[in-house]
Amino acid sequence: MGSPNGGKTSIFNRLTGLHARTGNYPGVTVSRSAGVARIGGDEYNIEDLPGAYSLTPISPDEQLVVDLLNGEVEGIGAPDGLLVIADSTALRRSLLLFAEVVQRHMPTALVLTMGDELNRRGGSIDTAALSRALGVPVVSVVANRGIGIGELRDLITGWRDWAVPPVDPPADTTELAGWVDSVLTDSGYRDPHSDARTERIDRVLLHPVLGTVIFFAVMFVFFQAIFTWAAPLQDGVEDFFGWLAGIVGDRLGDSLLSSFVANGLLGGVGSVLTFVPQIVMMYFILALLDAVGYMSRAAFLMDRLMSRFGLEGRAFVSVLSSFACAIPGVMSTRTLPNSRDRIATMLGVPLATCSARLPVYILLVGILVPDGTRVGPFSGQGVAMFLLYLLGGFSALTASAVVKRITDRRSTILPFYMEMPPYRIPTPRSVGIAMWEPTKAFLRKAGTIILVTTMAIWALTTFPMRGDAELTAAGVDPGDEVAVTAYTMEHSAAASVGKAIEPVFEPLGFDWRIDVALLGSLAAREVSVSTLGQMAAALDPEDDAEVADALDGWTYTAGPHAGEKVFTPATTVALLLYFAFALQCMSTVAIMRRETGGWKWPGIAFGYMFVLAWVMALIGRGITLLIT
């Protein structure tokens, strides 16, 4: 346990390796990381507790830590021993938390981190003297380089014999400050001087004007890279699934099983997996920026902007988390001490452009902006993606500000407190873990939710099967595979559902096939891509890997627009804006219900975002029709 950003998770990863698991604590949505450390033939259960500055809780996370130490969390017993993680460059503050912990009379050891940083900046400490002054074992580690991990593992094996302080630290605030001073003096602690390199860089990156310009430039390059650097890998994945579909057709022939594998699986899940290179690239760059130390600077810069929306700086962490996924964004609102701030932020963060929207955006931007389009020296598709992400961030802040103004008109904004680590050279291990974990979660989703939903949609678009007599009576040649597939799909169960809700979306230019994709996306936004992908593969089996090209050739099958192109620029813009604003994620709705304790706020969120999405899509379509 320890304060945030003190190195807890790096030590946890070193101790547990591949034997860790993540989840939520019972009854709450605070993330839980637990794992097994195998030392000398024995196994030790290790728990990475939420970050806490104090055991006098002011947030749900800190309250959970206290409950865990008291053994009051259902299904999880009180710990046998505690490793208190302390940043040696800010040891004075860390000792205040240690003093509270050691008063609980549990086996406790102190683990110092950032020792290399302390030495580089002219600081020093005598670890053995600190151990004598505190009366507990003390070990120093540099987790990202593996230094001291062996000594820490040996320490863990003897937890039953850890020394305990003969006298508790004082509880009085004034006396406690004097106790900390005496401990630091006895241990020969010398405070590190300020990091000159970090200060020089921060004079530029934290400048109110220049720093903001650099921030947007970094984000702009970020989205350019997603399209340019990952494009060759994406082409390779597309070619691979096209090759697999060809083999399936050759081996299985014209059969129901062939249709299921080629169209249901490869045309559905395969079309989603095509976007894995972009997702890997996105998380790689984000992990790099975070490991270097830039993301905390971005939070500081954005705090100035957020204060204009009536939100406190801590809410930026929720907005930033939501650019990966709205679920951790909603969960992180628990760190906000004000309940009205939590509600306001919670109802806004789903508008931030999460990674689940990325496959949808890449597909639709590919249709809207042709390959090779340039905006000056930049890729036109990259510029479009940058604008969509900018729209998501601005919309999230605006929505939260509106909710805050309506629900809490008399509130005051609390000061924003966030530690800024010195700039560091990231290690491949740390970047790799930060990149792989969310990518693994995406692949797991593709293998479960998306797979199951894709199979269901394939069945709904394939059944009921049509006999030759019915096909002939309808003027369809039973020997024409594409014509038979089109007729079957047009008269399928999915078509009945899509056509039933078509009047709602008809003003936006959506036909029943897009409506089916929208319904499927409620399970996961990426399902809309798999749905369109499998329908495109069924109707154009020669081009099943190039989903965007296949969709570009779709025409309306009935109604006043029969024969006209479906994915016109106006309709594509409308669909982009609908996905930008709609809450197409039932998992997020479920998490909001757990966080708020009822259906009131999730219902309001889903309702207002649907109306907002529909109106913005209609406006976007109208403007596009006027200028094209």
Image (cartoon, grey):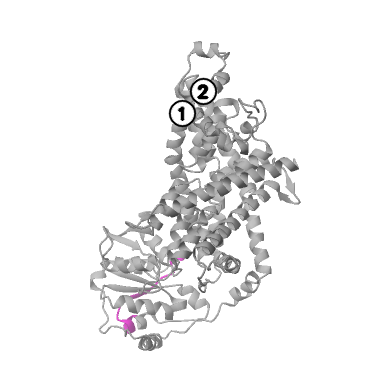
Dot 1: few (<14), some (14–19), or many (≥20) neighbours within 10 Å? some
Residue 367, position in %: x, y? Answer: 65, 39
Answer whether residue 208 is magenta in the image. Answer: no
Say left or right for 32 vs 389.
left
Question: Which quadrant: the N terminus?
Answer: bottom left
Q: Residues within 10 Å of mark 2 (few under 14, many from 20)?
A: some
**Of 327 and 21, which appears nearest the observer?**
327
Q: Using the rendered image of the protein, determine whether residue 362 is visible from the camera's viewpoint.
A: yes
Tell me the mark number nearer the camera, choosing from 1 and 2. 2
Q: Is residue 201 above or below residue 186?
A: above
Residue range of the region highlighted in magenta in the rendering: 131-145
Q: Depth check: give the residue in front, 366 or 201.
A: 366
**Element under label 2?**
loop
Figure check: 567 above or below 63: above
Depicted 591 relative to depicted 419: above or below:
above
Cα separation between marks 1 and 2 = 10 Å
Q: Tell me the element at label 1.
A: helix
Say which residue label 1 marks: 460
The residue pinned by badge 2 equals 491
Q: Nearer the viewer, residue 578 or 281?
A: 578
